[in-house]
Amino acid sequence: MSLLTQSLAPGLPPAVPIWKGFPKYNFVGGNIDPDTVATDTLAERAAAGIRRHGARMAFYNMGCGPLGFDLLRERIADRLNRLRGMDVSADGVLVTSGSGQGLDLINTCFVAPGDTVLMEQHTYSAAATRLKKLGARIVSAPLDGDGIDTDALAGVLEGLRADGVRPKFIFTIPTIQNPTGSILPLERRHALVALAREYGVPIIEDECYAELTFDIERPPAIHALAPDVTVYVGSYSKTLSPAMRLGFIAGDPALIRQIAALKADSGTSSVTQAMVAEVLADGYDAHTAGLCETLKAKRDTIVNAVAREFGTSVDVAPHVGGIYIWLTFPEGFDTRRLLEPAAKEGVIFNAGADWSVMPENGERHMRLCFAHMAATDLEEGVATLARVCHDVAGFPERRANVAAG
């Protein structure tokens, strides 16, 4: 142990391992298809942004103050108002370095150690991890095929009230829920708002996947129904590039200014902000339309592969958008049993227990991300996973690759 390592603070997480690249069949992570990155458009818009706004890059935050580039915030607000039914101004938008930073800022602004937070029964694992690091107590909000079960949630809230507990907020992903893929119907959005007001609990609405829907009409954002109780989080990671790290928070301007007081990075990349501002003005809608067609085809490929390889032993939740599918295995089976043997065959996936507030409720589930993989790799990866599952657990009994042999 060197002098440097001896001097490190206690309680640090383990060091990251040496990077060895992705496995062949990587069903993990919010990556996107490399072929769908609009490289020519992004290059052109980046050049245009620098030419038009480059002089402003002489100043932190492009001379626009801590909320971010004003033109970008105006265009974000315009899209939210037109497409998500909201009524926000540029002063109600804070640009962040990805939605992850947005969630960190919101958590720090709302949550102290020991506070209670409600999260959906199955939820974005990184969001739960962030809250646990703050010392929050996370309570599970029941889900069904349509998202949060608001009738059951009322019982949870009433029970907490009886114990003298008022949660700091309800965290929800209502449009393409992560990981289950559900879309909360309009009537349940109204019911959720009514519960938030009745029990005095704000709503944090994460809509990072809302623009990736296939052939359906999205309900309005919860924020559109109740701006007085809702903070909205969005991102361009899943539509343009996860590596760009550009997201935003939208809400009441006074609250946005308070959240911005915690943002200590001297501003999100000015080049990225200028580039995305130009993309939103010209080319973004056409790009996302084409992206959704690509994702829909890949969704069909992986769903068909699961049906072919696993048969009736595994159920696939309906997915009408997004970049992942959610599988349910037989009762009593824990998908974590497959992690190590599958990795040896070049397959990695998200075990459901890691994406659930109460791990035991997610044991029989699995999340498979499909956006970044080629169709042939999706099919081969699912076939390999089915073979590993058969070797470990004895099912599925018949797989297409076995039957063909």
Image (cartoon, rainbow, N blue to C red):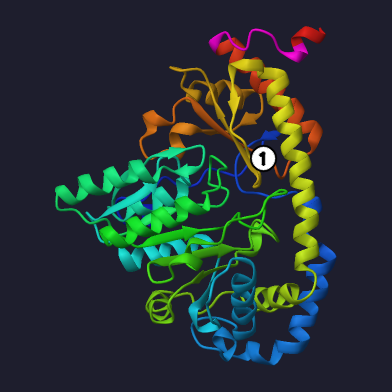
Residue 313, placed above or below residue 75: above
Residue 366 point in image, percent of width and height: 54, 31
Q: Nearer the viewer, residue 75 or 367?
A: 75
Q: Main secondary structure of the magenta part?
A: loop
- Amino acid beneath label 1: Phe
Residue 17 is one of the magenta-drawn residues: no
Element carrying mark 1: loop
Q: Give the residue pinned by disc 1.
A: 22
- Looking at the image, can residue 129 be seen? yes
106 w.r.t. 120: above or below? below
Q: Which residue corresponds to the image point at 68% horizontal and 77% vertical from the top-left?
A: 271
Q: Return the x and y of residue 79 as percentages of the image width and height.
A: 64, 72
Residue 1 seen in the current view? no
Residue at 64 percent across and 72 percent down: it is: 82
Residue extending farthest to the front is: 187
| Image: magenta residue range | 393-401
Q: Is residue 387 above or below residue 155?
A: above
Q: Badge 1: few (under 14), some or many (20 or more) residues near its Cα, within 10 Å? A: few
**Side of 11 relative to 94 (left or right):** left
Q: Quadrant of the C terminus?
A: top right
